[in-house]
Image (cartoon, grey):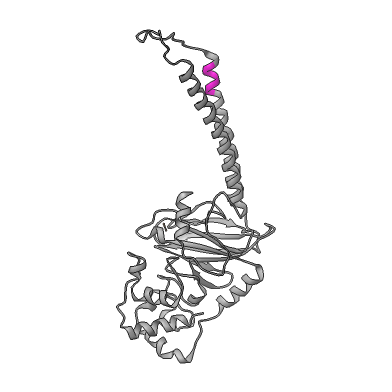
Amino acid sequence: MLVCLVASLLQTRVPDLVEHRIANIFKPLASPAQSEFDIALLVFAITGAIFVVVAGLIVYTVWRFRQKPGDNALQEPPQVYGSNQIEVAWTVIPILIVFVLIGVTTRVIAGVQNASPPASELKVTVIGHQWWWEVLYPDYGFVTANEVHMPASRDGKTATYLQLESADVIHSFWVPQLSGKTDLIPNRTNFMWMDPREPGVYLGNCAEYCGTQHANMLLRVVSQEPADFKQWTIEQQRRSVDDPSLNAAKAVFQSLACVNCHNITGLGKANSGSKFGPDLTHLMSRQTIGSGVLTNTPENLRAWVNDPQVAKPGCLMPSMRLTPGELTQVVNYLESLK
Ligand code: CUA
């Protein structure tokens, strides 16, 4: 709880959007998070009651049987052994409590995990990388990064199903107000679903230590009105903007090693299919750079391309040591990728 709260506060602030900044597990805004919240309350209530009873008995005993003036400190108090009723009671009651907790927990886990997707629902594939998120929309045929857009589901009748994979090590997908954590494991496919009830930006983060920049593997779910989501998919499906006035800048970009890692659909054969780094086709439609470490502004983009190791030490994108002229050209070209 505290960890997610702190991580969320570190997230880049983007103006003009409803942001659920404090990723508060006690304020669930989707069905899986709601059922997990309900069961958490039940467990708190039961364990809280046990705590009150046990602590109360201890306090009572300590007070009732404290040493009094005139007691012989060397004499043992009367010893009581072997009450079958008491032994049976304090064995059976905890077993029953544990079985109740196991039963309700299993039911909630099964209810969340076994919900099978209706054929028409949105499917999204999320692939964890050190230290960013690749986000694929297979039904729409485009790829983006670090922001998972999905339609809001005010009535809870539609949902987004996430297929979770990893390109390298184990990561964990966690947006506290929408659902619990699910790991992204190499050579294994996991699933989860969520139905954000309100449009807005829900902040999350990688919840499994995955290397140096684990803490900066930030994540955002952008929940939109269905019409806005549809519009967003249409924009994402477009090829990259081709502005003839930027041909020189584009040529500089193509001549550099950037294209070995980053795909830009429409840029040409040189880089088609590069998936080592985030797809940049619509870079400027995203709110942040570096998986949430910087707001996506021209100044930050320039600083990031100049040397990503400043904002995100240890990240796998090196400084290309561009001359100021090359840097300007590259940033100009990237800024055209609306
Ligand atoms: Cu990815 Cu921690």
**Percent of width and height locating residue 172:** 46, 55
Front residue of this view, candidates 319 and 257: 319
Highlighted magenta segment, given as a residue range: 86-91
Query: Which residue lies at the image location 61% right of the left edge and 55% below the top edge?
Result: 29
Farthest-out residue, bottom: 245
State the image quarter where residue 151 is shown: bottom right
**Percent of width and height locating residue 222:** 56, 65
Q: Quadrant of ligand 1?
A: bottom left
Q: Is residue 303 visible?
A: yes
Depicted 60 relative to depicted 297: above or below: above
Farthest-out residue, front: 69
Q: Is residue 87 inside the magenta stretch? A: yes
Q: Is residue 105 left or right of residue 65?
A: right
Q: Is residue 115 visible?
A: no
State the image quarter where residue 77 is shown: top left
Depicted 243 relative to depicted 110: above or below: below
Front residue of this view, candidates 202 and 236: 202
Q: Is residue 118 inside the magenta stretch? A: no
**Percent of width and height locating residue 12:** 46, 65
Q: Is residue 319 left or right of residue 122?
A: left
Predominant secondary structure, magenta span: helix
State the image quarter where residue 49 is shown: top right
**Percent of width and height locating residue 152:** 63, 63
